[in-house]
């Protein structure tokens, strides 16, 4: 565990000694802030229009503001996660330090988990900016915190799965641009693969729908913890890290 934490701190520090982390944090905060401003504006305008028409239907800030914003945060993460993972191993291969890692007494699994954990912690830093926006709602409104907490859990599990996939892809090349582009392509495919279930009901279509990253987030967005969705994300994390371990093992043998 000590080696995992050492690798994690080293990797996380490398993000913040370069402009990468600050650029990602700034871009994520601006983009999510724009979504928040628009969703809140729509909610306020709809409430005023209902009052002017004399309608008394209750408005749900969790369903009309928080849930769409959590879905949008997942979409934004789809673009940011490749930028987080593309350098994890590709940079090591480019600079030649991957041989030092491969021949070091540190186990492959400790290296992999340390790097993946650093990427996940950086993503958590991105989510902190979303929490600042939601704090505004709790200051001036009365939303239910439980669906929000469940939504954050879903975002972390979803990000953990995508980060594990990106970590594996980063071991396949020494070019960060190729690693980032390939990661984005794979993650985008996992994002849209469930669309086939909208018009096809055969077994293979249901299989594709089950593999969709977004379909498993819907229950979290509603504030419901569905075990099958949590198991899917956890299994995806283990699969991504397992493939990374096999790729690292091949690098060790070549070294």
Image: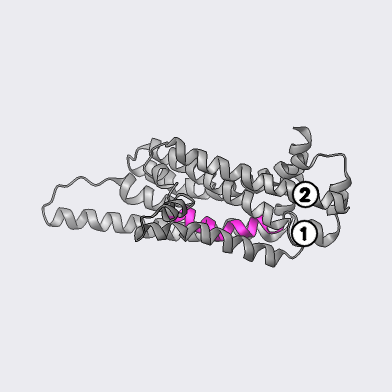
Residue depicted at x 12% and y 57%: 53
Q: On the rendered structure, is 197 left or right of 115?
A: left
On whether residue 81 falls in the magenta region, the answer is yes
The foreground one among 136 and 23 is 23
The foreground one among 116 and 122 is 116
User: Given the current orientation, which residue lies at the most extreme left position?
Assistant: 54
Residue placed under numbered mark 1 in the picture: 91
Image: 221 above or below 179: above
Disc marking residue 164: none
User: Given the current orientation, which residue lies at the most extreme top position?
Assistant: 1
Residue depicted at x 52% and y 50%: 129
Around disc 2, counting alpha carbons within 10 Å, would you say few (fewer than 14), some (14 to 19), or many (20 or more)? many
Residue 186 placement (x, y as % from top left)? 58, 60
Q: In the rendered image, which quarter contains the N terminus?
A: top right
Residue 235 placement (x, y as % from top left)? 57, 41
Residue 12 in sight in this render? no
Q: What distance separates the C-alpha of mark 2 from that of mark 1?
A: 14 Å
Residue 234 in sight in this render? yes
Magenta stretch?
72-87
Q: Is mark 2 on a helix, strand or loop?
A: helix
- Examine the residues drawn in magenta and state their main secondary structure: helix
Q: What element carries label 1?
A: helix
Around disc 1, counting alpha carbons within 10 Å, would you say few (fewer than 14), some (14 to 19), or many (20 or more)? some
Disc marking residue 248: 2
Residue 109 placement (x, y as % from top left)? 75, 40
């Amino acid at each position: 565990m000590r080696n995992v934490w050492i690798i994690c701190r080293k990797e996380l520090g490398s993000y913040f000694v370069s402009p990468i982390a600050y650029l990602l944090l700034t871009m994520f905060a601006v983009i999510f802030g724009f979504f928040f401003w628009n969703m809140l504006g729509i909610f306020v305008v709809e409430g005023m229009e209902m009052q002017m028409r004399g309608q008394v239907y209750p408005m749900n800030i969790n369903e009309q503001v928080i849930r769409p914003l959590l879905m949008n945060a997942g979409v934004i993460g789809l673009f940011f996660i490749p930028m987080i993972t593309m350098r994890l191993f590709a940079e090591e291969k480019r600079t030649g330090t991957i041989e030092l890692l491969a021949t070091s007494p540190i186990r492959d699994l400790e290296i992999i988990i340390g790097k993946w954990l650093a990427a996940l912690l950086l993503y958590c830093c991105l989510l902190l900016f979303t929490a600042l926006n939601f704090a505004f709602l709790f200051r001036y409104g009365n939303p239910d915190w439980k669906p929000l907490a469940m939504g954050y859990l879903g975002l972390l599990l979803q990000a953990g799965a995508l980060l594990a996939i990106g970590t594996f892809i980063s071991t396949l090349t020494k070019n960060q641009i190729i690693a980032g582009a390939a990661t984005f392509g794979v993650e985008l495919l996992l994002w849209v693969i469930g669309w086939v279930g909208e018009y096809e009901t055969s077994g293979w279509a249901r299989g594709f729908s089950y593999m969709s990253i977004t379909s498993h987030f819907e229950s979290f967005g509603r504030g419901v913890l569905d075990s099958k969705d949590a198991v899917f994300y956890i299994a995806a994390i283990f699969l991504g890290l397992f493939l990374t371990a096999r790729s690292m093992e091949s690098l060790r043998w070549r070294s």
